[in-house]
Amino acid sequence: MAKVLCVLYPDPVTGYPPRYARDDIPAIAGYPNGQTAPTPKDLGFKPGELVGCVSGELGLRSYLESLGHELVVTSDKDGADSVFDRHLPDAEVVISQPFWPAYLTAERIAKAKKLKLAITAGIGSDHVDLKAAAEHKVTVAEVTFSNSISVAEHVVMMVLSLVRNYLPSHQYAVNGGWNIADCVSRSYDLEGMHFGTIAAGRIGLAVLRRLKPFDVHLHYTDLHRLPADVEKELNVTYHADAESMIKQVDVLNLQMPLYPSTEHYIDEKKLKLMKRGAYLINTARGKLVDRDAIVRALESGQLAGYAGDVWYPQPAPVDHPWRRMPNEGMTPHISGSSLSAQARYAAGTLEILQNFYGKQPIRPEYLIVDGGNLAGAGAHSYKLS
Ligand code: NDP
């Protein structure tokens, strides 16, 4: 019997289960690149249910208990006396979500002597020290593509919200006002603007595809260039270096993974290269940007707006400066955890567990670290330094 330790965000303050707004969700069988959606046996939940919180348990209990394993689910993840730390030394599998990350540091991995598998229920395994995982022969897997389109939709929403000044205008209406001049004095059309994404992977490319019908000029930079037919279809300009793109665009989107050398990728220097009044969107990771440089750029007007859902650390402390900076459109880390996304990443987590306990290979597209090195999708998109 093994211990599976699962860290999930807390239940709704109004209790569990919530009263659902809809009765069903569309069934998504596959993704734009031909990859199929997860295909586990015997889902332990109904798609559309809130399974990403503690009481939802990602729907895993019936499967794991049928094999005689122990499932521990908690949201208590920080501090030496947390439930997470207490159970970690006995855990064979750790499951965590980027929205409420259980930071699997090198110190914690060294204490987790029985740990064989760390699953990210979602995408983005930067909360795991990948180098330490490789050294300790811990396999790291994530549910690639499960919430990429969810995030792409969120990026489009944030671009439009900032450029059109939606959130402050909504607030005037809520407050009983009719302040048209106040609302429109920061409101523009997206049409004709230049939009650039740093990284055009699964999410970045989906964002470009979704913005094309808005008649914007599209730009991207990436470690690998998109196929020529895709560049032609999107009429997108490739930039060999980020700097040349950053100077030209009105809206800049960050969509690359976080690893040691991309930390603080957007710093004071790159912010100064941007056009005055540009907008910055970040649904990738909070640490990709210099936190305080963002605040200064918004206060000076160098940035007209900043929106995203990723912070560092998570949950963000109540006094985090991004909660109070001007012209921001921040939310907690939610873009990849819609009920639709949860159905896919919970199913993917179950599929990975069924492969692991059934001694079957985990899909290469789910692997980040395996056999002591980056592997599968991880070998393509991550670096260990
Ligand atoms: P992909 O792996 O499909 O895409 C990442 C892209 O980044 C790849 O094209 C990769 O290049 C590129 N890249 C890596 N390093 C650099 C660099 N230094 N400069 C430019 N490009 C770089 O991942 P996804 O699109 O699915 O996800 C991207 C990130 O978004 C995740 O790592 C995660 O941090 C975040 N995310 C956030 C979510 C949320 O809820 N807010 C949910 C899901 C993901 P190549 O592969 O060509 O070498």
Image (cartoon, rainbow, N blue to C red):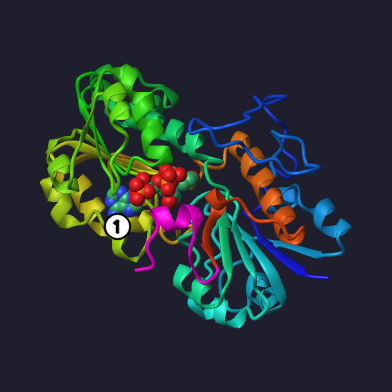
Tell me the SS state at disc 1: helix
Would residue 9 appear left or right of 32 to someone viewing this image? right
State yes or no: Cβ of the residue under disc 1 lies below 8 Å from any atom of ligand 1: no
Q: Height in image: 252 above or below 259?
A: above
Q: Height in image: 191 above or below 55?
A: above
Residue at screen point 84% across, 52% down: 62
Residue at screen point 13% across, 55% down: 269
384 part of magenta stretch: yes
Q: Height in image: 225 above or below 314?
A: above
339 or 112: nearer the eye? 112
- Please give the range of residues in magenta: 371-385
Query: Tag 1: residue type?
Result: Arg
- Observer able to see residue 301: no
Would residue 141 appear left or right of 310 to someone viewing this image? right
Would residue 65 appear left or right of 95 to someone viewing this image? right
Residue at screen point 37% across, 54% down: 286
- Identify the residue position indicated by label 1 in the image: 291
Rendering quarter of residue 258: bottom left
The C terminus sits in image quarter: bottom left
